[in-house]
Amino acid sequence: MHIEYLDPYTLSWPEGVFPLGSDALALGEFATVRRGWRVCDLGTGSGALLLLLARRAPDLALSAVERDPLAAQTARDNLAQNSLTGTVVTGDLRDRLLPAGQFDLVVSNPPYFPVNAGGSGGPERSEAFCTLEQLCAAAGYLVKNGGRFALCHRPERLADLLCSLRAHGLEPKRLTLLSHSPNHAPSLLLVEAVKQGKPGVKVETRLRVRDE
């Protein structure tokens, strides 16, 4: 069992569940979240993003979808062990397993590489079970008008991401590019979109303070 301390919470996960990484940590700090919001994590894995958001804002109504039964149970266990309540649904996020338009914030740390694209992210990072377009469709279905969808992705997928967001009524409003140093190209893209938001996006760059 692996353990990571996310003050004031503790995250644990067994072999076979996707590990906590710097991308999830960055997204957990980037996403806008406020007290009492209804939050849903698509493809939650161990539930790391739920804990990262819960430590930033109290009284969140936490929900998640995860297709892998072991990971889904791990997320439930992490909520219970940290005295947090929430609903983790085991199933395919494309199947609309939760009510439409009910969430103030949807987040996701999704697969990065299209099938047969030659990426080296391993099976957990392949879009074999959910494409970027399908992920944005699911988020657009779940988030309420004026609500937010925040996710991390690869900078080279920027055009695909922005097109997919807009196609599902999600207007990009914040975009951050993270790099390891001023001399390195960005290695991570963070985007937050607003359901039925007005056009106009704020762009910034910054250094990654932690890498796994």
Image (cartoon, rainbow, N blue to C red):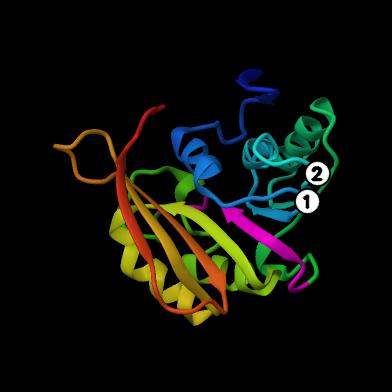
Q: Is tag 1's residue or tag 2's residue first in the polypeptide sequence?
A: 1
Question: x, y percentage for residue 92?
Answer: 69, 61
> What whole-number distance in Å separates the C-alpha atoms at marks 1 and 2?
5 Å
Given the image, on which type of amino acid does mark 2 rest? Asp
Question: x, y percentage for residue 56?
Answer: 64, 38
Tell which of 117 and 83 is nearer to you. Answer: 83
Verify whether residue 107 appears in magenta: yes
Residue at figure coordinates x 82%, y 35% from the top left: 84
Q: Which residue is mark 1?
A: 36
User: Can I make out residue 129 in this image?
Assistant: no
Number of callouts in the render? 2
Q: Quadrant of the C terminus?
A: top left
Residue at figure coordinates x 43%, y 42% from the top left: 122
Question: x, y percentage for residue 144?
Answer: 69, 72
Relative to 78, residue 171 above or below: below
Question: x, y percentage for residue 163?
Answer: 40, 76
User: Can I make out residue 206 in this image?
Assistant: yes
Residue 135 - label:
none
Residue at figure coordinates x 26%, y 46% from the top left: 186
Tell which of 139 and 32 is nearer to you. Answer: 32
Given the image, on which type of amino acid does mark 1 rest? Gly
Q: Residues within 10 Å of mark 2 (few under 14, many from 20)?
A: some
Q: Which residue is mark 2?
A: 59
Q: Is residue 83 left or right of residue 200?
A: right
Circles 1, 2 touching at the beta carbon (< 8 Å): yes
Relative to 171, residue 191 above or below: above
Q: Secondary structure at mark 1?
A: loop
Verify whether residue 104 appears in magenta: yes
The quadrant where residue 86 appears: top right
Tell which of 158 and 178 is nearer to you. Answer: 178
Q: Secondary structure at mark 2?
A: loop
- The magenta stretch is 100-112
